[in-house]
Image: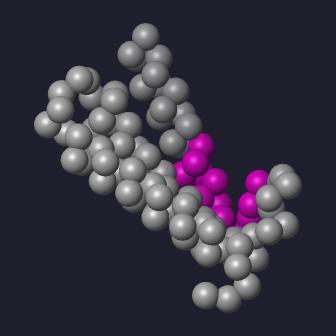
Amino acid sequence: MHETLVIAAVLVLTAGLGIGLAAVTTGWLIPGRGRAKVVRPRVWGYGTLIGQAGIGTFLFVGPLSGPSMEHVPYAMAGMVVFALGLYVQRLATKTSF
């Protein structure tokens, strides 16, 4: 079961990195309802990349590394970085900083 979760996490993180890189380099966003709200796709892409780094840190240092409590501060720092990525994505939906 653990290997399956690791593979799923890697696939989701890889997809997020690909979407973030596409937004940063080309300004392309995946089609969907929220696409019309994003006025700065490159900023949104940077937010996605920051969020992927945070959630990857959380997952692989925290829950997927085992029950050790010594990594909890690092995992929580990953969650803070993820929240920062969400904030940057939110900035991409506004018309001015």
Q: Residue 93 versus residue 6: which sits nearer the camera?
A: 93
Q: Is residue 13 left or right of residue 33?
A: left
Q: Position of residue 45 (x, y in %)?
A: 60, 65
**Relative to 83, does residue 5 appear above or below in the rendering?**
above
Nearest the viewer among 12 and 69 is 69
Q: Check residue 91 for magenta coloring.
A: no
Q: Residue at x 71, y 73 (%)?
A: 93
Quadrant the C terminus occupies: bottom right
Residue pictured at 31% horizontal, 48% vertical: 76
Q: Residue 75: x percent and y percent?
A: 29, 44
Q: Quadrant of residue 31?
A: bottom right
Give the residue drawn at x 45%, y 55%. Answer: 82
Specify the segment rendered in magenta.
Answer: 15-30
Q: Position of residue 15 (x, y in %)?
A: 59, 43
Q: What colour scheme does the image use? A: one colour
Residue 59: image location, x then y, percent: 38, 37
Rendered image quadrant of residue 40 = bottom right
Could you tell me if residue 49 is visible in this image?
Answer: no
With 71 as the anchor, is 22 left or right in this view?
right
Residue sitting farthest toward the left: 70
Q: Quadrant of residue 24?
A: bottom right
Identified at 22% across, 47% down, the residue is 73
The answer to if 19 sits in the magenta stretch is yes
